[in-house]
Image (tube, helix red, strand yellow):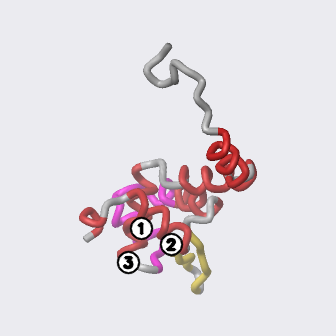
Amino acid sequence: MSADSCDLLCLDLEKAEALRRARLQPAEADRVAVSAAALGDPTRVALALALQGGGDLCVCDLSWIVERPEKVVSHHLRKMRTAGVVGSRRDGRMVMYALTDAGRRILAALVPDEVTA
């Protein structure tokens, strides 16, 4: 047997069945995984941290902050928006981005407080 599995079948049926009934449905688990994956790239983490510290920011500002080309930043923001981690709004000719509540929660779970302080 491997070190990652039991040598003996010892199922706690009551506990296991209760947890099985309470688990996320596949569609909800997929949604959560997509949201979490939205911060699975160093550039996207940097963008999320910038938005956390700066509030609403445009692509130009974000590009300057994370030192990446605007096209790269736009690509990452699009992925983050699709996953529900950031939202956007038009302000004249600019598009402003901000973390959503879900984005703030995911970022808080992934990044220790001392990093963002």
- Depth order, front residue of 93/104: 104
Q: Amino acid at mark 3?
A: Gly
Q: Amino acid at mark 2?
A: Leu
Query: Picture coordinates of residue 4 (x, y %)?
Result: 47, 25
Q: Which mark is residue 54?
A: 3
- At mark 2, the secondary structure is strand
| Total marks placed | 3
- Residue that appears at 35% across and 66% down: 64
From mark 1 to mark 3, how far is it between C-alphas? Answer: 10 Å
For the record, the magenta segment spans 56-73
From mark 2 to mark 1, how far is it between C-alphas? Answer: 13 Å
Q: Amino acid at mark 1?
A: Leu
Which of disc 2 and disc 3 is earlier in sequence?
3
Residue 11 drawn above or below residue 63: above
Query: Picture coordinates of residue 94 (x, y %)?
Result: 55, 78
Q: Is residue 65 magenta?
A: yes
Q: Residues within 10 Å of mark 1 (few under 14, many from 20)?
A: many
> Please, what is the dominant secondary structure of the magenta stretch?
helix
Whether tag 3 and tag 2 are in contact, CB under 8 A, the answer is no
**Residue topped by disc 1:** 62
Of tags 3 and 2, the one toward the viewer is 2
Q: Which mark is residue 87?
A: none
Location of the C terminus (image quadrant): bottom left
**Residue topped by disc 2:** 99
Whether tag 1 and tag 3 are in contact, CB under 8 A, the answer is no
Which of disc 1 and disc 2 is earlier in sequence?
1
Of tags 2 and 1, the one toward the viewer is 2
Left or right: 117 with respect to 87? left
